[in-house]
Image (cartoon, rainbow, N blue to C red):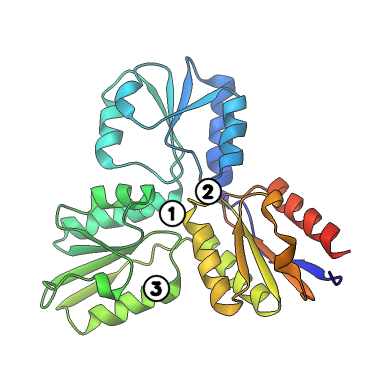
Amino acid sequence: MSPFRVTVASSAGFCWGVERALRKARDAVETAKGPIVTLGPLIHNPGVIADLASQGIGLVDDVDIKTEGTVIIRSHGVPRGVMESLAAGDVAVVDATCSFVKSAQTRAARLHDEGYRVIILGEPDHPEVLGIRSYAGPDAVVVEGPEDLPDDLDGRRVGVVVQTTQSQARLAAITAALVTRVRELRVCNTICSATERRQEAAVAMAADADVVVVVGGRTSGNTKRLVELCAQVQPHTHHIERAEEIDPAWLDGAAVVGVTAGASTPATQIESVVERLRELGS
């Protein structure tokens, strides 16, 4: 294997919302009463979830099985009904929902209240999108692209909100498809600013790389988006969770190997990947 240089995108890894969620969880270990659990994974990173478990923070998927102690709401948020059930119970609640996700929920509810049919651009089964949809009214629709738009929008008042980890290109495509069909279109660009910075940095890095390695959880929406965007620029793009997954065959003939990481990827995981690549490239 020929020597190669390793570069890291200028913006990669933990975002403010993830750092805030982890800080709230660790503070809860010191101050909360009773057993502590997160409702769903706090963030989409298996290594971080394992670390939280080692600190005594459990995980449940169903609010109904938690009757005491403290429940931490995941950074992706939860559906409206779940929050209402928790508020009516006896458990203490630590809300670690990202503020950008909260904004998307609030705007979806406002659009519905003002008489708009709400279109949510996002992954239909993603926890964040399920939460946003619960605020958007019974006729809300989740789409991943223009091809998913329903046929009954002509002449309607339509409002758009966006999963925070989507790309501006996808939002532009949805907007262009809607603008000529509906009577009134209101677009709430709820894409997270940290997501935009990471996407822009990843694309710039990928343009100068012969191989790209994206580090992050396989269920992480923002990490999958980085993989998608980098692959459009550099087809030799690979998604891994751990340094051990790197296949040396990927690197044959490369002069520059670029690295980026999703917003739920800690610096230690990025560093371990960079260290392994430098070992292989020396």
Task: Answer few, some or many: residues within 10 Å of disc 1's Cα (few below 14, many 20 plus, some between 14 and 19).
Answer: many
In percent of width and height, residue 17 lies at 52, 48
Residue at left offset 72%, top offset 65%: 249
Q: On screen, 172 above or below 119?
A: below
Q: Nearer the viewer, mark 1 or mark 3?
A: 3
Q: Amino acid at mark 2?
A: Gly
Whether the residues at callouts 2 and 1 have beta carbons within 8 Å, the answer is: yes
Q: On screen, 135 above or below 208?
A: above
Query: What residue sits right under mark 2 in the picture?
Result: 17
- Apparent side of residue 117 relative to residue 56 in the rendered image (left or right): left
Residue at left offset 61%, top offset 64%: 238
- Mark 3 to mark 2: distance in Å? 23 Å
Quadrant in the picture for residue 46: top right
Quadrant, the N terminus: bottom right
Q: Amino acid at mark 1?
A: Phe
Query: What residue sits right under mark 1 in the picture?
Result: 100
- Mark 1 to mark 3: distance in Å? 18 Å
- Apparent side of residue 109 relative to residue 260 in the rendered image (left or right): left
